[in-house]
Structure formats: structure tokens, C-alpha cells
Image (cartoon, rainbow, N blue to C red):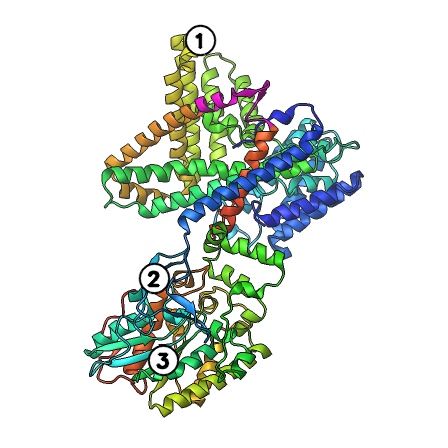
Amino acid sequence: MNPPSEDNSPRKTLPKRDIWLLPLLSVLTLVSLLLLCEATASHYFVSHEVDNCQYDDGTGGYRFRANCKGRVKTSEGPWVETQYNECGYRTKESCKSRPKDTVRIAVIGSSVADGFLVDYDHTFAQRAVTELRNRCKRPVELQNLSRLQCSMVCMFRRTDEALALKPDVLIVAMTPYDIEVTTDDEVKDRHEQITVKTKSAETKQNHILIRRVNMMLKNSRTAVAAEHYMLQDPSTYLRLFMLYGDKADFLREPLSSAWERRLQNADILLGEMAEKARAANVPMVLIEMPDEPQTSTLFLKTPLPNVNATLLNSRLHQIATQHGIQYIDSLPAFRQSPGANKLFYIVDGHLNGEGHAFVSRPLVDYLTSGPKPLITGCATASSHNHPEGL
Amino acid sequence: MPIASFSFLGFALLVVVIYNCFKGVAWRRSVLFAANIVFLLTYSLNLKTFVPLLSFIICGYVAIRIMQRPHRREIFITVVVLTVLAFIWLKKYTFLPHASFLPFAYLTLGLSFVFFRVMHLIIDSHQGGINDEVGFVSYLNYTLNFTTLVSGPIQSYPDFIGQHLPLVRPELTIINIGNGLERVIVGFFKVNVIALILSIIQNHAIIALSPEQPLLTRSVTGAIIAATYPVYLYYNFSGYTDIVIGIASFMRITLPENFNRPFSTDNFLEFWNHWHITLSGWLKKYVYNPTLLSLMRRFPSQKAELSIGVFAFFLTFFLIGIWHGRTSEFLFYGLLLGAGVSINKIYQVKLAKALGRKRYKLLSQSFWYECVCKGLNFTFFAFYLLWFWSTWHEIGRMRSLLGGSALWITWLMIFIASALFLTLWGILRSNILRVHFRGDCVITSRYFRTVWDTGLVFILVGVMELLNTPAPDIVYKAF
């Protein structure tokens, strides 16, 4: 490792050609090493995040083809087999017939609620079903109507379809991202039967150079691998996330005007959804599924000033209560987890199978032993083991 | 401010730029002085914590000025004894009563290295080796030089002043800059990648060591624990030295080398000529030589030569040992060092006598003998370092976890593996150095080195950014 000593010679200047040759060699070395890293990372960080069952029907979000089977994989996780029933829901049970004495739950949400990139048995939905069957000793099924990139308006538009299934409970599973991406125009046009082109991240970029660089980085497996390891530490992750302006403002006290407006939109949409549910005599439950920044905040050794992980949750709780919606806060359960980096696909941002377990536990507890149990006659949490992984 | 950090690098490069802005002697003196103060303040903003260290330095300056004037020998001896006692007291050696220590927390950063510099100035001033008046700011710059304060290397005052304040400075060429940059890169890589990985490996092995492990696995675990530390220490300390030598070179100051491939040596005495060279050199000049000379004057018999030589070695190495720390572990470490060097010296002399110089030389050059000696040298180093990095309690615990048989297998493994590896590495290295292209050695050519150093930077940045584990601090910072 000690540097060799060729240059102990009395030579004082470099030959002219070395002035450009040495930097060129350095650049070539870097490029070669990057290519080598890219080749290695491409081998270990394979990604296939487009489910061949998904398609855009123009009503918001990607829906899934009926009776279709697919495969997806995030670079940070295993291959996952997906399977959709005759209604295109990620549910093994049929959506058509509801067997007698079966408790039916309908879930509306986006990709996180769908269990995107997570094995079916490890999704919060299936974990909850398994635990409910154990506790209640009767058949339970969950029709998961969630779609990829489904904003709050998309969820709103799915309410009728969900209620048509005649569920015993309607669950709306929401993430901060779902609230963030819902625009004022969408909310205004929520009753219109217009065709919505589902936005992809690339369409937001106008500048061609930035877009190209962005695409290169997005497609680079080395960048993914680097981010994956670099962001393992919650404080590093959060420090970088907080550099986002508006995107990160839902964690900052007081809430920004943009987020206040988004919460007003949530208020409108949840209010109308609650009215529909009430008319159908179906209890409606809102559960906030924490995202990675919120969870990282719980694991900071030194709290950041004016950063509050529960800010959004308490506001959603208020909105839900106003509209008679029952609210489940799953964030406290995440405090008992081994760390934010264990519960999410760090670069991708979706909850992983272990993370889903921390959503299903408060959900099942609330449904069976909450203040007003929605599913009665079940054993309480203390008399049963928690789902696998907890 | 950790030395092997980007913040230190940024600070040092800023100082270098300002230092090189103007040619004047006063400018250089002032910039270095300001940089040293700022560097110290990065460790504490509470001025009270600096009082003991600064008092020691100021008393040292007074002592040097006294030594530069006509004085009696008794005064010199008193000054030396008082300086040693002040150092021992400030370092809180455990054999002193606890109640005698200062009742507040204070900074002892680099105190040992400051002590060596002050002692060197006192002794050399007394002996007439430093004729020019030592200016106060220059003295402070010498003792508190931010590039050498934390862990050396120990540079002599004339050497430092000759490079720091000459009227005409050597040119800072692109080759000097390239070489300096290379030292910094290599140093960062050693501390933040190799030393970090080795410390992780050792920590994992310490956690994994258990009596439930099968005998062979347990022995391997024990061997990893004992053998990784010497290598870790080498990369940690030599990496630090590379960084400061590189940075000082940008200021046109050539700091002395502290390491010269120590594991390639094949005996204890030679090893210490290649390991922490400036410390060995200091002790040789101020302890070994005076002791040897005074004893030889007192006992001029030829028969006593070996005993005197061995005693002087023992004393020198014992002092090296106890200098490292304040506890009984370091006392024992010093005894092991002293015993090791004494046995090595006696063995060399007796064997040379028994075989004759020619046959002894032939034996020393034989492949297998060299191989065994390298293995023994490394194994003994790894053995006595146990008292350097762990406590009696930890050593006892590891010993009981290993058990009798595994303990022997562990050391046998270290000996065989180190003997083979170090010998093969030596052969490989000499063969690589033989590869030439158009008369130049390929591996030492600037083209190869550019590629190599770029690779190191790439890996360094990757590891520092991705591993999320800070590299352990410089071990010798504690001394």
C-alpha cells in the first residue's frame, strides 16, 4: 500500500503529454469501475416492477386484468407472484359469491395497500385475514380493490364498486403519498366520467437533459445499490428526505398551506365516501399506512426540530372523526419494529412483508377488540399470538 | 476533528492554500499558528480544558530558555526530572494517588508527542545542539503543529524550522503535489477502508468466540482476534501518518517517515527499526545511546558488553511499552517488549558466536529460516499486543473461552499462516517490481499509480458512503 518512489528522481515537471494523459487515465479508470459496478449491481439488483396484469383503464390508477397471473420484483426484494380474481382484485377468494357466514372486508387503496412487491401471504391484507380467522374461528375474506398509483380521487371513484360487494367493513388504506398526489383539479372533477391518464414520474420532467440524466440514474443499478446501502441509517435517510420542499412538508410543523389544501381535499373526499358507506350501512374505517420518512422519524437518536411524524395522522384522525369514520393509527406499532430500514424497500419506498405485519396487527386489534368491535365474537389480542414476523 | 475525515481534509487544504499565498516568513509563521489554534479549538471550546496542556508547553519553553543559557548540570537534571514528572502527572498514570490529579477534565491531545518534542529541545539545548534562539511562536508551532500534534511523527526542531521558515523555499511542483495527494489518498484508504474492515472482522470474531464452537472453529476465531489487530494497528497508524505527511508536503515540510514495511522484517530488533520509526529513533538517541555509553564508561570490561547492551535495549523497550499507557497492562507490555528484545539480542550474539559470522549470515539468508523468523516475529508481535488493546479481564475471558488446546492451536495457526503469507508476499512483491516496460518499473510508473489511486478513491468513497460505519479513530491519539 505504501506509495512507490519513482518520483524521488530529480525530475520537477511532467512531460507535456502527461498533463492530459494522467487525468484521462483517471477518468477512464472511473468509467471502467462504474461499468464494472453496474454489471455487478445488475446481477444482484434485478428489477421488474411492471406487472404484466396491470393496465390503465382511464379511471385513475392501474387496474389488473381479471384472472391474471404475473410476476414483479423490486431490486431490493425477491420475485413475487401476483394473482388476481375474476374482478381483477388481488384476492384468492372469488368476488362474485359471498359464502354464508363469511365476514367480507373490502379494501380501497393504492399500491401499498395492494401489497405491491410483497408476497401475497405477507401482505397486511392476507396477514389480517389469517389472524382474523384464527381469532374469530369463522371464515373471513378480504376483497382488495387497491390499484397502483391510485390517488384519493381514484379511491373515491372505487367506493361504489367496493360497496357493491356488500362488505361487512370498508377499509380505506391511505399513505401520505396518496394525499400528496391528489390535485385540486382532480377533486373538482371527481364526479365527471373523464379519462384520466395515469401519471408516470417521467412526465413531470420537462427538460430533456434533466430527464435523460434522471432516467439514467433511475435505471442505474449501481445508483440503486448505492442508495440501498447509504440510506440504511434513518437519520441519513431523513436528512436527505427533508431536503425535498413540499414533498416533505407533511412532517414539518406547522403544516404548509399546500398540505392544508390537500387535507381539505381529503376532508371532502372522505366525507363523501363516508356518506356513501353510511347509505349502504357499511362501517368505514380509515387506516393511515406510514411511509418510510414517518417511520424513520421514530428511530432518530436526536429529533429534528419541527419534525413530527404524527402530524398528518392526527389531522386525518380529526377529519375521520368529523365524518363518523373509524380511524386506525398504525404508526405507534412501528415504534416496536427493529428499525425503519427493516420495514421498507428503502430505495423503492414501498413497505416490505415485515412492514406489512406492523399494519395488520393494529388493524386486527381494532376490528376485533377496539372501542366498538366491528367483528364480534373474536378472541382478544392477548389470547393469541401475533402474526408471523411480529 | 478526526484526522481521516473529509472535514480535516477540507480544513488542511484551506490552511495549505492560505499558507502558500505569500512567501514571507512572518506570514507562514502566523498562518500555521492560527491554523494550530483553530485545530485545537475543534476539540473543545472550553478554554479551561487547555490550561494544563498549555502550562506544560509554556513551562517547557521556560526550561529550554534556561538550557540555552549557561547553567549547571544539576539544573539540567532537575529540569528533565520535573518535565518527566509533570508528564506522568498530567497523563494520570495509575500508580499516582488519584487525589493528586487535577479535579477537572482537561485536554491531553498529543501530550505524549508534545513531551517528546519538549524533551528533545531541552536535551539538545543543554548539549549545545540548538544554537539559535528558539522563538516563542516558532516553538508553539513546533509543539502544536496540527499535522503532527495528534500522533506524530516526531520531527526534530531544526528539521522543522529549516523547512517551515527558510527564506527561500523549494518549489512546489506538480510532481510534489501529485505525490502528496497520493499519500493522502493512500492514508485515507488505509484508515477508512482497510483498518475499518479489519476492526469489523475482529469485533465480529470477539462476539462469535464461544466454548460451544467446535475446536477448529474456535481456534480460527481466536487466531482472527489475535492476528487482525497488528494488521489493523499498522493500517490505522500508518494511514494517519500518510495523511499528515501528504498534507505537510503541500506546505513544503517533509515529515519523517514512521513506517517502512515492518512486517517484512524477520527479527524483533529490525521490526522496531521499521515500526514507529520516529519513536524508536527518539528513544535510541535519548535513552539507549546515553545509557549504553554511560554504562560502558562505568564498566569498561569487554565481558560486560553483551550484558550492558542487553540492559540498554531492555530499558529502552520497557520505556516504549510503558509510554503507551497508564495501567498495569502497559507495564506488562513493556516487560514483554524488554524481554523480547533482550532474548533476541542474546540469541543473535550467541548463535553468531557458535556458528561463526559466515555460517550465521548464510543461515539468516536461507529461505526457511527467514520464513520461520518472519512468522515468529509476527506471532510475538500479535502476542504482546494483546496487552496493548485489551485488559487483564478481557484476556482472561478470551483465554477461558478458547480453552487450553484451542489456545495452542490458535498461536500455531498464527505462526504458520503469518510465516507463509509474509514470505510469499515478499516473493510476489519482488517479482512484481521486476516487471519493467521500456526500462521503467511498471507498478511504480505514474500511469499505473494514477489508475491505482483512482481505484482507491472510488472504493474509499463507496465504502465511506455506503457502510454507514465510521472508521475507528486513530489508535495513537490516545497516547
- The residue at the point 71 percent across, 48 percent down is B34
The residue to which callout 1 is attached is B357
- Direction from residue B192 to residue B140 in the image, left or right: right
Q: Residue A28 occupies which quadrant of the picture?
A: top right
**Pointer 1 and pointer 2 on the same chain:** no
- The residue at the point 52 percent across, 41 percent down is A33
Q: Chain of mark 2?
A: A
The residue to which callout 2 is attached is A70
Distance in Å between CA atoms under marks 2 and 3: 25 Å
Magenta span has A331? no
Give the amino acid at mark 3. Answer: Ile
Mark yes or no: residue B436 visible. yes
Q: Residue placed farthest to the bottom in the image? A: A279
Distance in Å between CA atoms under marks 1 and 2: 82 Å
In the foreground, B43 or A242:
A242
Q: Position of residue B12 (x, y in %)?
A: 65, 45
Distance in Å between CA atoms under marks 1 and 3: 93 Å
The residue to which callout 3 is attached is A171
- Direction from residue A122 to residue B28 in the image, left or right: right
**Callout 2: helix, strand or loop?**
strand
Instruction: Report the magenta residues as a range.
Output: B426-445
- Direction from residue B141 to residue B310 in the image, left or right: left
Q: Position of residue A335 (x, y in %)?
A: 39, 69
Query: How many neighbours does mark 2 have within 10 angstroms: few (below 14), some (14-19), or many (20 or more)?
Result: some
Mark yes or no: residue B72 visible. no
Q: Nearer the viewer, mark 1 or mark 3?
A: 3
Give the amino acid at mark 1. Answer: Arg
Query: How many neighbours does mark 3 have within 10 angstroms: few (below 14), some (14-19), or many (20 or more)?
Result: many
Find out whether the residues at labels 1 and 2 contact each other: C-beta distance under 8 Å: no
